[in-house]
């Protein structure tokens, strides 16, 4: 399994509103909604003077009213970037576990009150924002971001007593389905709803050409880690963010 491929897929599957390529680094901007879409991804070969390059990135993010944030994976260029950022006073936050699963022995889902739409509907967006407490400003940004994904998408919702109690997103590309923003109503957690919804989404992914799945979960999210382990996911690598300061402005989630 090519772990660097998963980083590439994750850039495609969680779109920013604007992207700037700078000497092998991918700089992403999305009005502050999520660190994934508002961070520097230094995954390609870097040739410029590092200190000057970091300073230029700081100017760019400051001009866009965002904290300068780097996503640090095992694939960064140059390899000592994390140490350099630490020396410059960047804080380490949100260590995250990237996990994968082969889709050959999936359990069959038991609950059937699930819908998967390949186009984002207003109902799905409203329910997601309700369950994940996304504010109106970020809701508009999220709608634009998700509408920009160019590969096959599955917007999943699970119903209980005629109301949506869990929802999420799956994106398929190159035999992988990536899972994003799996969320369950706070009043219906620990009842197996998220597991059933994910099993439906993975089944849909397999039916549409996926052989593997991947996801990212913050390493201190014990309930989510237990859920994904139960389904069969296992860690393949970790990443974290380096942020210029601890004031995250509008950037709220990973």
Image (cartoon, rainbow, N blue to C red):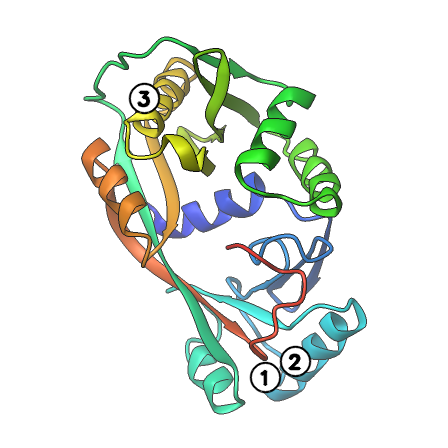
Rendered position, 177 above or below 68:
above
Q: Is residue 217 above or below residue 144?
A: below
Q: Nearer the viewer, residue 155 or 175?
A: 155
> Number of numbered discs present?
3
Marks 1/2 in contact by CB < 8 Å: the verdict is: yes
Dot 2 alpha-carbon crowd within 10 angstroms: few under 14, some 14 to 19, many 20 or more = some
Q: Look at discs 2 and 3 and give the one toward the viewer.
A: 3
Q: Position of residue 139 (x, y in %)?
A: 70, 40
Closest to the camera, between mark 1 and mark 3, is 3
Local crowd size for mark 3, using a 10 Å CA cut-off: few (<14), some (14–19), many (≥20): many
Question: What percent of the width, then of the height, locates residue 3?
Answer: 35, 50
Q: Earlier in the sequence, mark 1 or mark 3?
A: 1
At which x and y percent is residue 164? 50, 21
Provide the residue designation for mark 2: 53
- Mark 1 lies on residue: 50
The secondary structure type at the circle numbered 1 is helix
Gap between marks 2 and 3 measured at Cα: 46 Å
Q: Is residue 49 left or right of residue 185?
A: right
Is residue 228 positioned above or below 123 on the image?
Answer: below
């Amino acid at each position: 399994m090519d772990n660097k491929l998963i980083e590439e897929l994750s850039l495609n599957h969680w779109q920013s509103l604007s992207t700037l390529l700078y000497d092998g680094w991918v700089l992403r901007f999305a009005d502050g909604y999520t660190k994934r879409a508002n961070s520097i991804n230094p995954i390609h070969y870097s040739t410029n003077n590092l200190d000057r390059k970091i300073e230029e990135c700081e100017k760019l993010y400051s001009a866009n009213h965002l904290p300068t944030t780097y996503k640090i994976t095992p694939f960064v260029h140059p390899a000592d970037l994390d140490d350099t950022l630490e020396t410059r006073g960047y804080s380490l936050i949100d260590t995250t576990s990237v996990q994968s699963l082969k889709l050959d022995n999936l359990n069959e889902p038991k609950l059937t009150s699930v819908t998967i739409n390949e186009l984002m509907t207003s109902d799905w967006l409203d329910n997601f924002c309700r369950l994940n407490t996304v504010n109106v400003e970020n809701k508009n940004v999220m709608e634009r971001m998700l509408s920009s994904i160019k590969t096959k998408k599955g917007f999943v919702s699970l119903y209980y007593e005629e109301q949506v109690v869990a929802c999420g997103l799956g994106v398929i590309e190159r035999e992988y389905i990536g899972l994003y923003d799996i969320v369950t109503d706070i009043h219906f957690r620990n009842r197996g709803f998220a597991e059933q919804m994910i099993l439906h989404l993975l089944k849909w992914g397999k039916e549409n050409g996926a052989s593997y799945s991947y996801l990212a979960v913050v390493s201190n999210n014990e309930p989510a880690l237990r859920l994904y382990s139960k389904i069969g996911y296992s860690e393949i690598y970790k990443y974290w963010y380096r942020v210029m300061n601890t004031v995250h402005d509008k950037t709220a989630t990973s």
